Image (cartoon, rainbow, N blue to C red):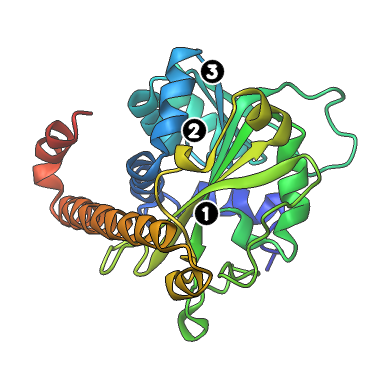
Amino acid sequence: MQPVNSRPYWDGRFDAEWEALRGRDQSRFFASLAVAMWPAWLSQRQCAQAWTLCDWGCAMGDGTDELAQALGLPCTGVDFSDVAVRKAAQSYPASRFVADDWLQPGGGGDPPRWDIVFSSNTLEHFDDPWQVFAALSRRAGRFIVLLLPFEEPEHGRSPEHRYRFDRDTLQLCPTPEWVLCDATVSDLGPSPFWPGQQVLLTYGRCSELSAMGFVDADSRLSRIVAPDAQAIERQRAPDLAEALRQRDLASAKLGELLQAHHRLLAETVQAPARASGWRRWLGL
């Protein structure tokens, strides 16, 4: 059997079983989830300034197509599998797809830059995902957005997953030029594609965040680990403690709405005959 992160392994999967195992539906499902969790402050800026987006690890392009339609941005799909890119280009001729291995040292010369580099459920496949992050950062001009499994149970962990993302392993500053500026966790519950939590991490280039005057209030009131309000009260800052409490209440409400959204997506996947109905409900 070929190593999990090798091109022959993924060429084989895309050629033989990806569609039969509903990989196309999975890619679109995760892209829809990412859009639902996408930071509002980022959406406002990317649309106003007509930014570009790259979907790294695009597989057969279904998630790329979903992102382009939902976010309204020019979106390029990149994957190191020639098989996947060929099928993506056949399915979505209006989009651009590139077969390129970003993880090869020195490959491709001076790389192009996109304003946002997005990747869905890929970094967990690597022993050191932060080295992969560094490779992505060389192609991203402003932001890197990652959708990842979060706190994956050890007993049910996928054999393809080499790294577990949780509160102890997330890096706030993976490289000197990049910092985590937004994080949202959502529990998918009984989703047919991922029965558990996913986290959307938004990393910003420090110079970009400084230039736009990014402040804490710009983030979406969502935190992976909430500050200890009681400790703040002991420091005689009751107003701040109350503000944090209200923030956490708002974050909990957002989580409830997202869970309802995920349940609808799961029901739709299980009942393909109703697919057109849920897409109209989502406005897609």
**Cα distance between the residues tagged 3 and 2:** 26 Å
Query: 28 or 166, which is in the foreground?
Result: 166
Q: Between tags 3 and 1, which lies in front?
A: 3
Q: Residues within 10 Å of mark 2 (few under 14, many from 20)?
A: some
Residue 101 visible from this viewpoint: no
| Residue 7: x %, y % from top left | 70, 49
In the picture, the disc for residue 51 is: 3
Three-letter code for the amino acid on which mark 3 is drawn: Trp
**Which residue is depicted at the point 28% across and 53% down?**
250
Which residue lies at the image location 28% right of the left edge and 57% below the top edge? 255
Q: CA distance from mark 3 to mark 1?
A: 23 Å
Q: Residue at x 35, y 54 (%)?
A: 247
Which residue is at 21% across, 52% downward? 257
Residue identified by numbered label 2: 87
Q: Secondary structure at mark 1?
A: loop
Q: Which mark is residue 46?
A: none
**Which amino acid, by three-letter code, is at mark 2?**
Lys
Q: CA distance from mark 2 to mark 1?
A: 20 Å
Residue 161 visible in image: yes
